[in-house]
Amino acid sequence: MNILVTGGAGFIGSHTVVALANAGFNPIIVDDFSNSEPTVLAGLKNILGYEVPCHIFDCNNYPGMLQILRDEKISGVIHFAAFKAVGESMQEPLAYYRNNLGSLLTLLDAMLAEGISNFIFSSSCTVYGEPDTSPVTEKAPVKPATSVYGQTKQMGEEILRNVAAAKPLKIVALRYFNPIGAHPSALIGELPRGVPSNLVPFVTQAAAGLRDALTIFGDDYPTSDGTCVRDYIHVMDLAEAHVAALRHSIKIVESNFFDTFNLGSGKGNTVLELVRTFEKISGHPLPYHIGARRKGDVIAVWADVQKSYDLLGWHTKRSLEEALEDAWRWQQRLGDR
Ligand code: UFG
């Protein structure tokens, strides 16, 4: 089956291309390289042994999308293409609404025109805000988003729920917790632009001497060591969950289907625990200091993954150590670029 992967040159997208190909699907990428690099395609070729087809354009381009769905005989779509920087989304709300929601509407229109029903959407645990309890299940209330980025994910889910109720679509929305790591070959990985705002890319860059000390944003939270708790998941585990979600959608017979699934490891780790684990695998102390809390940070959130296990038959296979080892190997391969 030919599967369209929008944003397939991005961090999670490129790893999902590998997982799809490993599972016997034919991934076809659409990416405008606005937040990714064409070099990813060479990495994918090295891993898979063949060139993955890639169409370079914006998913807001309706005629272009229609043409690809038709020409490439697409059976399902995994939609990653979106802007994802929380801070930037507050400076450029229109760009975020236009890109993240506009491309979603365009794609759905094109899929309906072509009679394609299987659709996998990248959502986020940001929909839970600060949950009342963790592990958080999919039944937990969706809290008002604190960023435009978060809003586009919540609105995206709402749009999909409503469209699926009215149109012949089978939609799976995947709520990612904190994806980290890289392909173990170190041929693909995360390519943050500028100073990374996410923890692990900052840690690996600081360990490589490219950044000054890590600032840990607050150590006075009500957690075991005072630092925030997150659910870190290896990007290859996350990638494999997309294959499981796609298979689930293909198996569903009802034509108006929408459901949400948590994708996490099911474990919470504090920032300090992650730093200590990284120090262990890299064999060096990591320079860090404690700074002020970062505005908007959730105190603690980790996933209940029972539903994903029961219905998708998926669970994580890789540990935090493996994820950090792979992230570190990738950073070392990148050198100082
Ligand atoms: N952190 C630091 N120092 C840093 C960077 C991060 O201490 O330099 C801490 C944060 O305070 C947080 C933890 O590390 O406690 C993880 O932070 P990240 O920025 O890596 O991840 P977030 O959980 O804040 O954000 C992630 C995604 C967002 C998404 C959000 C949903 O990156 O896209 O989860 O909760 F919106």
Image (spheres, rainbow, N blue to C red):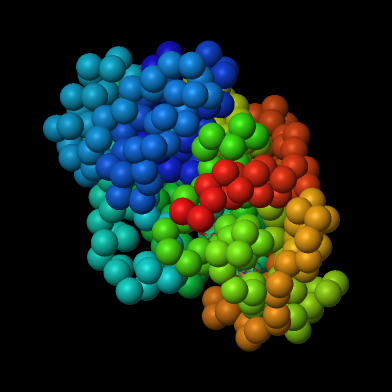
Q: Is any atom of residue 71 visible in this view?
A: yes
Q: Is residue 310 above or below residue 87?
A: above
| Position of residue 270 measured from the top left corner of the image (x, y, whole percent) | 76, 65
**Residue found farthest to the right:** 224
Q: Is any atom of residue 168 visible in this view?
A: no
- Image side of residue 62 versus residue 111, left or right: left
Residue plotted at (53% across, 24% down): 47
| Position of residue 64 measured from the top left corner of the image (x, y, whole percent) | 17, 32
Q: Nearer the viewer, residue 24 or 101?
A: 24
Residue plotted at (57% across, 19% down): 22
| Quadrant occupied by the N terminus | top left
Residue plotted at (62% across, 59% down): 208
Q: Is residue 231 above or below residue 214?
A: above
Q: How many marks?
A: 0
State the image quarter where residue 293 is shown: bottom right
| Position of residue 39 measured from the top left corner of the image (x, y, whole percent) | 39, 37
Q: Is residue 35 above or below residue 253?
A: below
- Image side of residue 61 versus residue 308, left or right: left
Residue plotted at (36% across, 51% down): 35
Image quadrant of ligand 1 equals bottom right
Q: Nearer the viewer, residue 4 or 120?
A: 4
Q: Nearer the viewer, residue 243 or 272?
A: 272
| Position of residue 184 measured from the top left corner of the image (x, y, whole percent) | 65, 34
- Image side of residue 90 versus residue 262, left or right: left
Q: Nearer the viewer, residue 21 or 242?
A: 21
State the image quarter where residue 230 is shown: bottom right
